Amino acid sequence: MKSTTRFVLLSAIVLALGGCAQKLTYERFQTICPGDPPEAVQAILGKPWMKSVNGQAWVYQDTDRGINAMIYFQDGRVTSKKWGDPVHGIQGDPAVTAPGESKETHIQEIK
């Protein structure tokens, strides 16, 4: 009886873990294209960790794996995206939609 209970319990755990596939992956991120609607992005990457106040930028984050992703929207469509992780580095273009914004980043090392 004990072995049957263990087998059932182990089977349930394996099935549960199999359904928990990671949605936030570089490969899935790459499939998002300009013009995609928010529903498509959420179907691909899952629910965002945070949305900007106006909903124009969605943030995805997995601190355990060091992943940060941003999806930028305008008029309900993807305009650009940005990815950062330890394996692929930082890739993509942040959206620049307001006067005074810049695509340039200046980094100053403080010693």
Image (spheres, grey):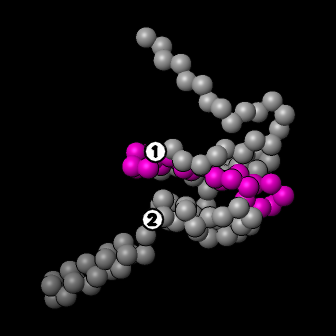
Outermost residue, front side: 104
Residue type at numbered disc 2: Gln
Quarter of the image with the C terminus is: top left
- The residue segment tinted magenta is 65-88
Residue that mark 2 sits on: 22
Query: Would you call the spot at circle 1 few (<14 residues within 10 Å), some (14-19), or many (20 or more)?
Result: few
Quarter-of-image position of residue 42 = bottom right
Q: Element at badge 2?
A: loop
For the question of whether residue 17 can be seen, the reply is: yes
Query: Which residue is drawn at the image coordinates 75% and 41% (left, top)?
Result: 96
Residue 11 higher or lower than 25, as above or below: below
The residue at the point 64 percent across, 52 percent down is: 81
**Residue topped by disc 1:** 89
Of circles 2 and 1, the one toward us is: 1
Identity of the residue drawn at 71% across and 61% down: 34
Residue type for callout 1: Gly
